[in-house]
């Protein structure tokens, strides 16, 4: 079994460390961590950082993995989940199963969270990014830890932000509504592989939990609530998350 994990914004693959440790299985292949361009990985020349480009990047990387091992079990978080949803709409056969949080992004009533709304606004978004660039490393770490990120991952994000900053605005602006709602409608009408809708119920970025329940049903996915968990559930509750994933894979 090949497990592939994809993260989002503002993140690097350091967010997965604790979860990978819980998933460790002697004799099994280690999970493959894919870092989207700009988010812990270099930005290719000519990269526009749009949602479609990230979707196509993920497709290409999964094609590489599939060539060696066959369809994979994909775990995706935040914008990584959005990249996965885009992939599922056009190349669902690349994965044997998918497990994503942020399914509420696909709900027809979803609107982007407050910080994203600033990023989406011309001129204002640029000012916000400039302010984030001006933050000290210590302030960056303190802010991310205060929001629930483990300190080692927060430090890696702080050290990587200058490159991330080039990608955030075009990524979000290419995903402005109704783009995500239309993607949700397309996925609801598609024949998808087995899916798991991870639902950390205290995540402040995805809207009311009922939307995750509704989208899980529309996508034919198993709904997996993590009561009281926040956005970085893989660092807050790695053992619980690993148990949910292993149980899903076993019953797939």
Image (cartoon, grey):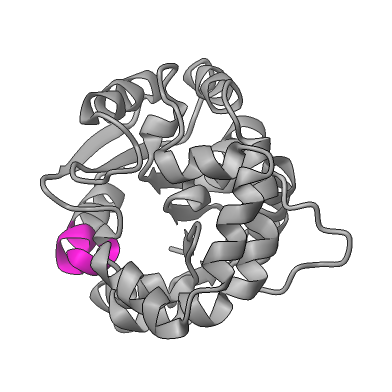
Q: Quadrant of the N terminus?
A: bottom left
In the picture as drawn, the residue positioned furthest to the left comes out as: 227
* Main SS, magenta residues: helix
The quadrant holding residue 114 is: top left
Q: Taking 28 as reference, is 148 above or below it?
A: above
Rendered location of residue 232, percent (x, y)? 30, 60
Q: Residue 77: percent from the left, percent from the top?
A: 42, 53
In magenta segment, residue 252: no
Number of marks in picture: 0
> Which residue is more in the foreground, 50 or 212?
50
Residue occupying the point 22% across, 31% down: 209
The range drawn in magenta is: 234-243
- Image position of 156 with respect to 117: above or below: below
Q: Position of residue 107 (x, y in %)?
A: 41, 22
Residue at 26%, 46% (x, y): give it.
Answer: 203
Q: Is residue 2 above or below residue 103?
A: below
Does any portion of residue 93 appear in the rendered image? no
Looking at this view, is 225 or 10 the one in front? Answer: 10
**Residue at position x 47%, y 66% in the image:** 11
- 238 relative position to 206: left or right: left
The reply, left or right, for residue 164 in relation to residue 96 is: right
Rendered residue at 47%/19% (across/down): 188
Q: Is residue 197 visible?
A: yes
> Where is 5 relative to 125, above or below?
below
Q: Is residue 237 magenta?
A: yes
Q: Quadrant of the C terminus?
A: top left
Residue 165 in picture, x, y percent from top left? 63, 64
């Amino acid at each position: 079994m090949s497990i592939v994990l994809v993260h989002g914004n503002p993140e690097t693959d350091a967010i997965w460390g604790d979860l990978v440790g819980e998933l460790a299985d002697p004799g099994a292949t280690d999970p493959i961590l894919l870092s989207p361009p700009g988010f812990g990985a270099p930005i290719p020349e000519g990269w526009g950082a749009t949602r479609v480009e990230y979707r196509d990047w993920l497709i290409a990387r999964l094609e590489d993995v599939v060539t060696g091992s066959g369809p994979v079990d994909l775990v995706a978080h935040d914008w990584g989940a959005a990249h996965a949803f885009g992939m599922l709409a056009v190349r669902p056969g690349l994965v044997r199963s998918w497990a994503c949080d942020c399914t509420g992004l696909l709900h027809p009533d979803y609107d982007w969270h407050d910080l994203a709304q600033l990023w989406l606004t011309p001129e204002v978004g640029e000012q916000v990014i400039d302010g984030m660039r001006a933050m000290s490393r210590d302030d960056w770490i303190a802010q991310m830890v205060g929001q629930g990120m483990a300190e080692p991952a927060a430090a890696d994000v702080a050290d990587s932000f200058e490159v991330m900053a080039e990608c955030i605005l075009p990524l979000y602006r290419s995903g402005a509504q109704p783009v995500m709602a239309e993607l949700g409608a397309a996925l609801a009408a598609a024949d998808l592989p087995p899916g798991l809708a991870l639902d950390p119920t205290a995540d402040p970025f995805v809207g009311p939990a009922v939307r995750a329940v509704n989208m899980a049903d529309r996508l034919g996915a198993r709904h997996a609530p993590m009561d009281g968990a926040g956005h970085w559930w893989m660092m807050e509750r790695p053992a619980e998350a690993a148990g949910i994933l292993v149980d899903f894979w076993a019953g797939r």
